[in-house]
Amino acid sequence: MNILVFGKDGQLGKAFQSVLTDQKLGEHRIHYVGRAQCDLSNADAITNLLRETKPNLIINAAAYTAVDQAEQEIDLAYAINANAPAILAQYAVKEGATLLHYSTDYVFDGTKTTAYFESDARNPLGVYGKSKAAGEEAIEKVFAAHPNPQAQFAILRTSWVYGDGGNFIRTILRLARERESLKVIANQYGVPTSAPWLASISLAMVLDENHQLRSFPSGLYHAIPQGETTWYELACFSVQVALDAGADLKLRPDRIIAIPASEYPLPAPRPMNSRLARSALDALMNQISKGSDVTKWQQWQQSWQEPVADYVQDLVLHKRS
């Protein structure tokens, strides 16, 4: 089997490299590509790469993610987040391949007071969210227009991703070394998602115990750990874990000040509520776990605190924050 992973230099792409290496898929050919190998804003480059690698499984972990910059770079955001997924979907339906594509809580406006379901209407606020929503719709339309029983897709929406790269947790820990107090938004809700956790869950979803492709219902899935939090609570938790692990920080959790989002304006609007209901993937993971490795189900059932704590402790241990 040929596996093609886009976004090798991003947090999720790096996580896939690590997880796929750990799984020792020696019988499979895995191609990792980043911007240097394939410009996702160039349709011909994508088509040529697909023709050369002939993937059976496409993992699109790449995206235009500069939320504020997207307000100025509209065409580029749509080229990468909407046009590129459409090309990948067209290849998948033609060749009977499986497509894993990653999306975001930003496809919603955040006005709902409870968690969003996959079936809730998209209503993105800014260009980034609109381009990601357009990518979701493009994949759905391509598969609907060209049904192929051998082809399947999963659009996995997630939120607040962190891993090997720049992210909120690392920023907080860096500032915690420099400052004795810090203001953090306390009225935006979501779920921190570990990139390695997401990569592992994704592979459990699409590969069976023999590392072969399994069949699953094509569609939208929300992939986030259990629970919910705010940026403020995440900052407090991360700082406390770092202190407990022996980090030399000036900041203490009781010196982190909760503020409303209105006190920290940004060029692009953010959804106030990024909570995602995970019932669809819950049902699938429950089915997958029956008669198989129970550790996959246990990993799926993790709360957000467990992988965050592991991540922070690793950063402190290796002095990488």
Image: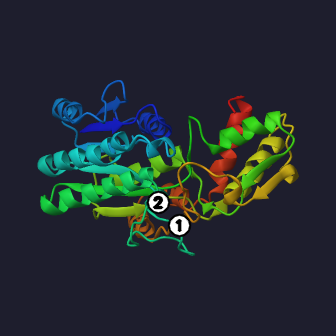
* Residue 31 appears left or right of 95: right
Quadrant in which residue 246 is drawn: top right
**Image x and y of residue 132, in percent:** 38, 53
Please name the residue shown 13% across and 61% down the image: 145
Label 1: which secondary element = loop
Residue 147 appears in the figure: no
- Residue lying at 28% horizontally and 65% vertically, measured from the top left: 217
Circle 2: is it few (<14), some (14-19), or many (20+) Cα within 10 Å? some
Labels 1 & 2 near each other (Cβ < 8 A): yes
Number of residues whose C-alpha sits closer than 10 Å to that of mark 1, classed few (under 14), some (14–19) or many (20 or more): many
Quickly name the residue at label 2. Answer: 125
Query: Would you name the residue on which mark 1 appears?
Result: 110
| 293 or 94: nearer the viewer | 94
Check the image and name the residue furthest to the bottom: 113
- Which kind of residue does numbered mark 1 sit on? Gly
Decide if residue 184 is on the left or right side of residue 273.
right
